[in-house]
Image (cartoon, grey):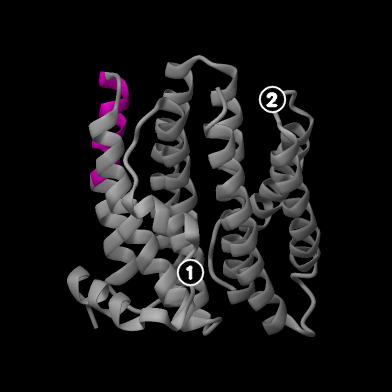
Amino acid sequence: MLLPYSASRRRALQLGAAASVSPWLMVSAHAEITSLNEAINKAGRQRMLSQRMAKAWLAKGQGINPVRAEKIMLDSMALFDRQVIELKAYAPSPEIKATYASLEPIWSHYKTALIGQSPAIGSTAGLLALDSQVLKLAHQGTVQLEKYSGRPIATLVNMAGRQRMLSQRTAKFYLSLTWGAEAPNASQDLSTAREEFTIALQTLTRAPETTAAIRQELGLAQQQWVFFDNALSMRKEKSGANRRARDVFSTSEHILDIMDKVTGMYSKLT
């Protein structure tokens, strides 16, 4: 049954405290863009949200933490809505503004696909095609803002922010594969995302701009990643599949929280 967006938003409120809300989400809901680094941070967060929404949709479809999955999906949609408006308003060049203008109609289609009907295995390929389009434009905007800044620290803000996206992207592909959904190149894309996360984590740790406090957080991310990556590597094993799917879902959220904190720490460096 089709549900209007407003009805889904009301459902999000009804869920209330049924699932915890990440601190970064609550802060972001009331923050405005005050600098290029913060714009890069929020632009990069849009990349993550595109993947997080699909991950939550897939989890809900498989009955994996369904209440929490629905809340994550709806909260992420609301945050994406706010931030795309903020980024379009802040855009410091016509090219960047055009990117966010192009993003809006595609985001509208993706939003409709997320909430227009209950998740179904046959709808997965279409949904992932839309999330890919949203991700592409969100990434384009982030890179444009990084180049506009022209400062080395902007590259680290972008890289750290991209780790958030990879944490959700790997979980998304894992859940699509375990569901048996028709998702072209999902297995290869999962492997690529895992490799990219590991390489970027090493690059961030070794960067001269990385402070001791940031390096400590990166160490926590590494610990979570080892557990997460081990679960990902056991995807084809039937025994314990449901437990691992829940672990992948929840651990991807832990990594997201850490890397969002790290991205914010980089964004405050001068």
Q: Which residue shows up at 74% across the image and 63% down it?
A: 228
Q: Which corner quadrant holds the N terminus?
A: bottom left
Say which of marks 1 and 2 sits in front: 2
Taking 44 as reference, is 10 above or below it?
below
Q: Identify the magenta region.
A: 94-104
Type of amino acid at the residue the image marks with label 2: Glu
Q: Residues within 10 Å of mark 2 (few under 14, many from 20)?
A: some
Q: Kindly identify which numbered label has been placed on residue 137.
A: none
| 110, 259: nearer the viewer | 259
Q: Which residue shows up at 58% across the image and 56% down it?
A: 257
Q: Which residue shows up at 75% across the image and 32% down it?
A: 203
Q: Which corner quadrant holds the C terminus?
A: top right
Instruction: Where is residue 234? Give x, y as percent.
Output: 80, 69
Q: Is residue 63 magenta?
A: no
Which residue matches tag 1? 56
On screen, residue 254 versus residue 270, left or right, reads right
Taking 100 as reference, is 147 above or below it?
above
Q: Kindly identify which numbered label has been placed on residue 209.
A: 2
